[in-house]
Amino acid sequence: MAFKERYGASPLHLLLVLGSFALTGYAGIRLLSGQEPWMVVLWFAGAALLHDLVLLPLYTFTDRAAQIVLGGLHRPPGPPAGASSAPGRSWVNHVRVPVFLSGLLFLTYFPLILQRGNRFTAYTTLPDDVFLGRWLLITAVLFALSALTLLIRLFRSRTTSSRRTPEDDSRSGAAAEA
């Protein structure tokens, strides 16, 4: 009990943190032990700058623009105005998640998707012209599942709000005033 009070978490947490530091250190040593370690450092610095100075403003602007343009869509029932959560923005995550996953897949496999992986067929003897179609299919499935999830949430919120009686509303209003 004294360890948890002093450290703030269980000993297992400390063990996992130390293990992750050890694994990160090992990976860093292996990565930097190549012939030109300064290239790895330059690549990481360039990636950080590219993300912070170009990509972050770009996807923040895109997200805000989508919220403004699509903000007039149906707003699911939720807490009254002025409450802590924004009910009209609950649909946004149903767009963000498939876009993020699709973008991550594209970022990982873009040489194959754009057929720039010249050595892929030579190394694997597999065709390299199927990745664009598969990525588009995965993206469509991600958006379809997200839309289905949103429709289920909207249906459940409507059935829940239609079951409420005026007495429920007066009780919740009295509880909020107290």
Image (cartoon, rainbow, N blue to C red):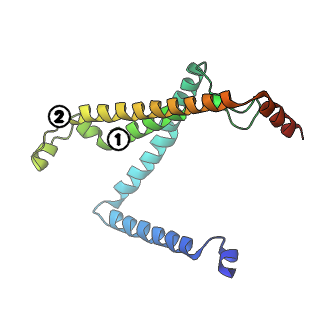
The residue tagged 2 is: 129
Residue 43 or residue 30, whichever sits in front: 30
- Which of the pair 24/173 is nearer the observer? 173
Q: Would you say residue 58 is visible in this rendering?
A: no
Q: Give yes or no for contact between labels 2 and 1 (Cβ–Cβ under 8 Å).
A: no
Q: Secondary structure at mark 1?
A: helix
3D distance between C-alphas at marks 2 and 1: 16 Å
Number of residue marks: 2
Q: Residue at x 12, y 49 (%)?
A: 123
Classify 10 Å Cα crowding around label 1: few (below 14), some (14-19), many (20 and above). some
Residue 159, position as x, y percentages in the image: 61, 30
Left or right: where 88 falls relative to 95: right
For disc 1, the marked residue is 105
| Residue 24 position in % (x across, y down) | 43, 66
Q: Residue at x 55, y 73 (%)?
A: 14
Q: Amino acid at mark 1?
A: Leu
* Residue 125 higher or lower than 145, as above or below: below
Left or right relative to 77: residue 96: left
